[in-house]
Image (tube, rainbow, N blue to C red):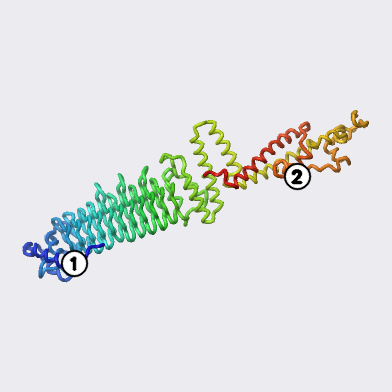
Amino acid sequence: MMTDWGVGAEAERAQWATATAHLDDFRPLLPAEEDVVAKLLSGSFDRLGDGSRPVEPDPARLVRARFLRFLLLGGEEGCRPHEKGIRISGAWITEVLDLEACRIFRDIGLNDCHFEAAPILRAAIINRLFLDGSLLPGLQAERLEARGGVYLRGAEINGEVNLVQSRLGGNLECDGASIRAPGGYALLAPSLEVRNVLLRGSNLRGGINLSGAQLAADFDCAGAVVTRADGVAIEASELEARGSVLLRSARIEGETRLTASRIGADMDCSGAVLDNPGEAALDMSRAVVEGAFFLRREAKINGMLTLTGASVGTIHDEASSWPKTGDLLLNRCRYGAFIDGPVDADSRLDWLARQMPERCGEDFWPQPYEQLAVVFREMGHGEDARAVLVVKERLQRKARRARAGNPLLRGLLTAADGVLGVTLAYGRQPLLAFVWLILFWFLGVVIFGYAEHRGAVMPNSAVVLRAPEWTLCGIDRSEHRSLFATQQTNGLAEPGQTQLDCFRRRWEASSYPAFSPWMYSLDTLLPVLDMGQRTFWRPNPSKPGGRIAINYFYFQSIVGWALSLLAVAGFSGLVKSP
């Protein structure tokens, strides 16, 4: 609640001021003071000289601070300020303007003035304060309460502006101001309550402290230069801004800290240069940005971008504005979509690869990959989502192998991960197992077809193998062989004819199933199928090409079982990392 601005309080203050000071106490008045008194009731700006800020103590512009205090507190009968307040420009103000704990119910306008000492408004209650274009050694206004705003536009301040725990009903406007406080913060305003903080085009050497501040609208530093190279340039931890934080085209040397802040609209770093090499350049850990995070238009981050635990509505970025490898922290960061930025797996995997968990004492962060995959799926990029999860599985398993202390266990994990990666993409692409099954099927067709061509396939039946038709087909017609079961001793094979081809041409073999390399390879590969080929045929290792065929027969039988089981496990999700 702002302080009661009732007429009774104003009258009480005016009476108190009148009782404790009189105009006669300041006589003889200085020429500038005479001019101020003469125009006191007009409510117009009292320009001393040409109204510009004096560069030296011109006697025609000298105004005593204690005389100003007398007027600001209400003056006396016949010498009271206008309802619009005191408005003076171009004055050289001597002594200390001490308004600590005072209640002033009119505007204080001291534009383009030169202050010999820092004004003191500590714990004061005022209407509005205008110090535009003035030169001050500082401003001490902690716990200030203002019905309106505090205006330092274009001011030159060689000292600290202290607004700790102050409450402003309007804006804190420092557009174009130059504030230098090398030993501390140029703007020190923790727990400030204000509508807008406007520092557009300003130059602050010493940094800004708005930790715990509450803004009804924006924190705008567009085009500002903020320097505090040996520390935190912008300290805005736990800042609550219902509007946006705007750093467009700003140049900040030192850390920009928005830890645990809450931003109701956008975080805009378009065109900004955030420079803090080797340390955090922009720390938004645990921050909540309900709107968009802009990092584009040649924005540069020379240092770490920390989004650990942050929550962002959408990300608008460019690859050229990403921090270099090792300077990006995204663990537990959540965001909704990518807008006007790279939306493909290759680019975003390069983005995630700029993380270096080792800097935080960890070996791998799976959550950023899972989050990226979720966003890709929600945006309709299913293939990119799967590609991200495959890389996540590979890196996660690599980290797990590195943690294994036993070399034997590490070797077993390497072999298992290799098989799962090649066959199922670690369970993320179970259909890949069917691709391998098809490849092995065609390979089997080639091998078994070659064996058939060379006659290295024989019936898988003991009865047939002992039959004279099969036996004599292995003997050339020109040869004679004495057989126990028959009186025929001449062979049946034509010159150059294989035993298999000869057997097939016999009428005795007309009822025997024909050999098909396609069906034989499929029958061998898939254990759940029974095409009958394995029952009736098998490779003959004694013939050319037969040994290769029989070895591949055993190998393909094992591979078929393994790939079938892996496919089932892949579709059921059993091989995915938790």
Residue 540, compared with residue 289, is above or below; it is above
- In the picture provided, is 426 more to the left or to the right than 325? right
Which amino acid, mark 1? Gly
Q: Can the viewer see residue 148?
A: yes
Secondary structure under tag 1 reads: loop
Q: Position of residue 81 (x, y in %)?
A: 15, 68
Q: Residue at x 41, y 41 (%)?
A: 360
In the depicted view, which residue is nearer to us: 550 or 297? 550
Asked whether, in this view, residue 340 is left or right of residue 422, the answer is left
Q: Is residue 176 above or below residue 443?
A: below
The residue wearing badge 1 is 85
Nearest the viewer among 565 and 411 is 565
Residue lying at the far bottom of the rendered structure? 42
List x then y, in percent, for residue 287.
38, 52
Q: Is residue 326 above or below residue 89?
A: above
- Residue 455 x %, y %: 80, 36
Judge whether residue 454 can be spotted in this image.
no
* Furthest residue in direction right, as rendered: 487
Q: Alpha-carbon neighbours of circle 2 within 10 Å: few (<14), some, or many (≥20)?
A: some
Answer above or below: position of 67 versus 188: below
The amino acid at mark 2 is Met
Return the x and y of residue 382 as percentages of the image width and height.
55, 53
Residue placed under numbered mark 2 in the picture: 531
Mark 1 Cα-neighbour bin, 10 Å: few <14, some 14–19, many ≥20: many
Res. 168 mark: none
Please report whichever mark, 2 or 1, sits nearer to the chain's N-terminal start. Answer: 1
